Amino acid sequence: MRREYEDAAKRHLEWHRKNKDQWPINVWEIISGERTGQYSYGIGHRQWHDFDARGDLEQSDMADYYATADKFIDFLKVSYYMYMPELSRSAPAGAMPPLMEVMRYRVKMDRIGEFLDANAKIKVAIEKSGAPLYCDVYQLFSGGEHPTYLFRIPRKNFADLEPPDPSMMAMLEKAYGHEEGQAVMNRLMESVVSVESELAAARPDMSYTPEAK
């Protein structure tokens, strides 16, 4: 069934090519965690009015997708996330990284401010260290439990999953001193209800890149 779904999803890409769709589609196969074996589809950063402007094209897209691949789908979930540039350190533009480490943080409702402040300080500490560490941060808007924050960390390979050197704690202490660095980490940990992690492998063969205009 898995092979049949992938073949059907690849056939659907032809709809995007024929219609000269200008929205890219990045597909990832989940290879660890509770969602292992599932696929994640992303359409990049959009403004809300983009969805209205898409209109009939979106309906036609979904109609073709369901006609082509629906019989192979057991589960489908749609979520909308808002990009947070103030907390993100985006990698240089380029092809999809081979792997993507994904962290979902469920945060205490009364500790959102502390969570955001701690992550802002962590971003500054990383930037001061000069370490080539990148992460895109998103806040869940619709389609799951709130408040949830999504961290997407590109990885070149499995070896790239090794903890950074210097460590995150060392970066914080160098940027703020031992006491404040530890306080930042404590505020982060105390603001979190739970953390879910997973690893995803890029599937460029199932993805779609619009032709340049």
Image (cartoon, rainbow, N blue to C red):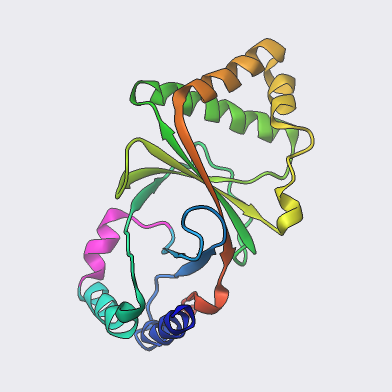
In the picture as drawn, the residue positioned furthest to the right comes out as: 165
Q: Is residue 169 left or right of residue 209?
A: right
Count of labels shown? 0
**Horizontal and vertical percent position of residue 201:** 59, 64
Which residue is depicted at the point 46% across and 34% down?
194
Which residue is depicted at the point 24% across and 66% down?
53
Vertical arrangement, residue 204 with respect to residue 80, above or below = below
Vertical arrangement, residue 201 with respect to residue 123, above or below = below
Q: Is residue 193 left or right of residue 100?
A: left
The quarter of the picture where residue 185 lies is top right
**Horizontal and vertical percent position of residue 1:** 43, 80
Vertical arrangement, residue 132 with respect to residue 26, above or below = above
**Residue range highlighted in magenta:** 45-55
Nearest the viewer among 63 and 44 is: 63
Vertical arrangement, residue 1 with respect to residue 104, above or below = below
Nearest the viewer among 93 and 42 is: 42
**Horizontal and vertical percent position of residue 182:** 64, 16
Which residue is depicted at the point 37% across and 49% down?
81
The quarter of the picture where residue 130 lies is top right
In the picture as drawn, the residue positioned furthest to the top comes out as: 179
Residue 208 falls inside the magenta stretch: no
**Horizontal and vertical percent position of residue 142:** 28, 48
Look at the magenta stretch and give its main secondary structure: helix
